[in-house]
Amino acid sequence: DEHGEVVAETRRSDLEPFIGFHYPATDIPQASRFLFMKNKVRMICDCTMPPVKVIQDRNLAQSLSLTGSTLRAPHGCHAQYMGNMGSIASLVMAVIIYDGEVDANGRAYQAMKLWGMVVCHHTSARAVPFPLRSACEFLMQVFGLQLNMEVAMAAHVRENHILRTQTILCDMFLRDALVGVVSQSPNV
């Protein structure tokens, strides 16, 4: 259902813990989820600073889009949300997995899905250098691939268990007819 839960944290002892905190899916709007699929690392150096105005050349045919920018200004409500948490700076890295989906024609395909996020907060203004952000993005990609393999393996194990159970039930049905289905283990 796309809700969130804080499952791990490292923090200074004077900061409020967030471990175990649950938040609804609506706390991360669909537009933000879409942006995390395109731009897997997002950094806010100082949420208290006013946004810098972007001046666009009048001769450009289309408006300038900062969708792909890691360093664009936060939305006003997000800056307020961070301030309410006592956070000034943040680095957020998306954990992306590939989930099996079926299109309108019944064809299966692998769709990218936002599985989770690694969020780093700081109580003062802070900029993470590009090489470190790139290394973090790479680690998140590796983690996402490993997670994908684990999820696929678990699905494979479940599928094999279901097939074994079906085989046993069919064998019991063929061998002992209806009596075997209710008297032997596993039974219905």
Image: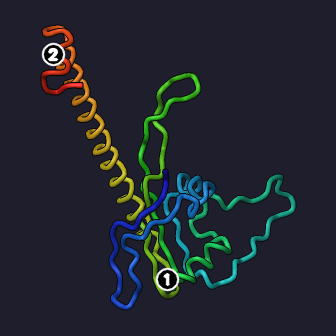
Looking at numbered disc 1 in the image, what kind of residue is underneath it? Arg
User: Is 24 above or below relative to 145?
Assistant: below
Left or right: 117 with respect to 174? right
Q: Which of the pair 93/18 is nearer the observer?
A: 18
Q: Extreme bottom residue here?
A: 14
Q: For the residues labelled 1 and 2, say whether their Cβ atoms are less than 8 Å apart.
A: no
Q: Which of the pair 187/77 is nearer the observer?
A: 187
User: Is 122 above or below relative to 99?
Assistant: below
For the point 49% across and 53% down, the residue is 2
Looking at numbered disc 2 in the image, what kind of residue is underneath it? Gly
Left or right: 65 with respect to 121? right
**Which quadrant holds the C terminus?**
top left
Residue 98 percent location from the top left of the image: 42, 42
Residue 42 percent location from the top left of the image: 53, 66
Q: CA distance from mark 1 to mark 2?
A: 69 Å
Residue 140 percent location from the top left of the image: 38, 58
For the point 38% across and 64% down, the residue is 135
User: Is 152 above or below relative to 27?
Assistant: above
Crowdedness of circle 1 by 10 Å Cα count: few (<14), some, many (20+)? some
For the point 39% across and 64% down, the residue is 136
Residue at label 1?
126
Q: Which of the pair 38/57 is nearer the observer?
A: 38
The answer to which of marks 1 and 2 sits earlier in the sequence is 1
Marks counted in the figure total 2
Left or right: 181 with respect to 34? left
User: Is 120 above or below relative to 48?
Assistant: above
Crowdedness of circle 2 by 10 Å Cα count: few (<14), some, many (20+)? some
**Which dot marks residue 180?**
2
